[in-house]
Image: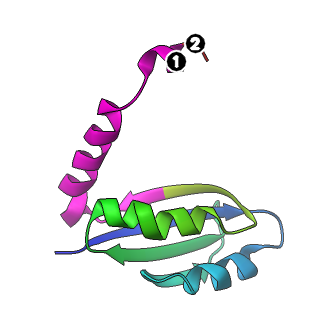
Amino acid sequence: MSVQVYILIQTEVGKAASVAKSISAIPGVTLAEGVTGPYDVIMRAESPSMEDLGRTVLAKVQAVPGITRTLTCPVTGNFHSFCRLCLRIADHCDYAAVSTL
């Protein structure tokens, strides 16, 4: 079973079209379109696992010029995989360093 996510993307002014075009070329991205409202682009991605999604698709999306903020929304049928990834990340968090910020 694959993992699917929607990612809502805010861009710099005037960059929505170029961001959507760049994102649509990333392997694993199944949809990238400009929208109106609080976000400028919405995309959908699919990957064999949440770990693979983060390592391949999300890393490439975050490197696209013009993106200012993203919000990742896992498709609910796969939410348990997302939760396991969050727990694995939390196990490696240095809370002492975070509390000094």
Report which residue position mark 2 lands on.
100
Q: Amino acid at mark 2?
A: Thr
Pinpoint residue 45: horizontal percent, then vertical percent. Answer: 41, 75
Q: Nearer the viewer, residue 10 or 93?
A: 93
- Is residue 44 toward the left or the right of residue 34 in the image? left
Q: Element at badge 2?
A: loop
Report which residue position mark 1 lands on.
97
Q: Amino acid at mark 1?
A: Ala
Q: Neighbour class for label 1 at 10 Å: few (<14), some, many (≥20)?
A: few
Span highlighted in magenta in the image = 72-99
Q: Residue at x 46, y 70 (%)?
A: 57
- Is residue 67 toward the left or the right of residue 94 in the image? right
Pinpoint residue 5: horizontal percent, then vertical percent. Answer: 37, 67
- Is residue 56 toward the left or the right of residue 11 in the image? left
Q: Element at badge 1?
A: helix
Magenta: predominant secondary structure element? helix
Quick check: marks 1 and 2 in contact, CB under 8 Å?
yes
Pinpoint residue 32: horizontal percent, then vertical percent. Answer: 55, 81
Kindly identify which numbered label has been placed on residue 5: none
**On screen, 10 above or below 32?**
above
Q: Nearer the viewer, residue 90 or 20?
A: 90
- Say whether residue 79 is magenta: yes
Q: Residue at x 26, y 38 (%)?
A: 87
| Protein image colouring | rainbow
